[in-house]
Amino acid sequence: MLSLKMDFRSIFLFCFLITTHLTAQKNLSGQTDVRPDFNRYFKDCGVEGSIVIYDSNQKRWITNDAAAMQKEALPASSFKVINLLIALETGVIKDENEIIRWPGKTDTTKYGYRPDIYHDITVKEAFEVSAGWAFIELSRRIGKKRYKTYLSKCSYGNLNIDEAGDDFWNFGSFGISAFNQVEFLQKVDQGKVPFSERSLGILKKVMVTETGDQYLLRSKTGWTRADNINTGWWVGWIENPQGKYFFATRLSQDRKFNRPDFGSCRKEITKSVLRDLGIPSR
């Protein structure tokens, strides 16, 4: 009987892995390279996670794990990319220079103590320094009905924004995969999303985080500590003479094993992979 149970268990596991693999492949167009050797960078940082890179010139997808790249997690502040677009498109803000008034207090237990951002702030600065309180203020003005409409039109995440709070991207059941992040960024770059050229132009300008002789980087980080789990993101794309490279890196770490380098690992892992692939990223 034990042997029979093990047989059934093995069959179930085999079917699950095949289904997961097919799910991870079904939306991919072009060549797909799975590079488990990249897992060493996650291991060095004491985290689990995934990285997805799309080489638009070669029409090539690269990932460390075809199943993990489909795992959904809270987007944290990487959500500010679409959040900014929605705020612009709905007229909640005029442009990136609009000032958001400091409400006078924030929940430092949930968001940490960051006195350097507790002041009136422009939308651009709020995006750059990831001032969560400012985008929570915008969220209250936008409302979940309008969020649901735009998220649906963009096929962004699992659409579960029923979290009671205003920042459903940091807490609750909302989730997006690394693969979905890259899909969305591609559509943003190509203008295949329900936002005006003006809104997209403002976003792309605000997203510029690095420039070099041969490349330009647009990106956004994210980090939430919901459910005592560190969930970190770095998403964006690099433009250079060879083409465009879209990326999304997701990290996960039980806060029982919290490490001070978690924040820096988001970029370190990504840049290590990009270097291995010969993609300039400084």
Image (spheres, rainbow, N blue to C red):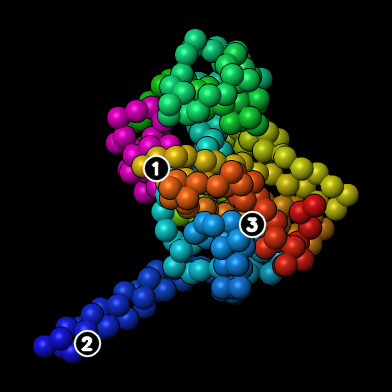
Proximity of marks 2 and 1: CB atoms separated by less than 8 Å: no
* Residue numbers of the magenta segment: 156-175
Mark seen at residue 228 = 1
Q: Which residue is more in the foreground, 186 or 180?
A: 180
Instruction: Specify the quadrant of the image occupied by residue 80.
Output: top right
Q: Alpha carbon of mark 2 to alpha carbon of mark 1: how far?
A: 36 Å
Location of residue 33 with respect to 190 vertically, above or below:
below
Mark seen at residue 7 = 2
Q: Return the residue at label 3.
A: 269
Residue 250 in percent (x, y) is at 52, 53
- Residue 167 belongs to magenta span: yes
Q: Residue at 43% of width from left, 37% of height from top?
A: 170
Mark seen at residue 159 = none
- Residue type, mark 3 in image: Ile
- Residue type, mark 1 in image: Asn
Location of residue 34 with respect to 175 vertically, above or below:
below
Q: Inspect this view and state whether residue 78 appears.
A: no
Instruction: Specify the quadrant of the image occupied by residue 23.
Output: bottom left
Q: Alpha carbon of mark 3 to alpha carbon of mark 2: how far?
A: 39 Å
Residue 214 in percent (x, y) is at 85, 53
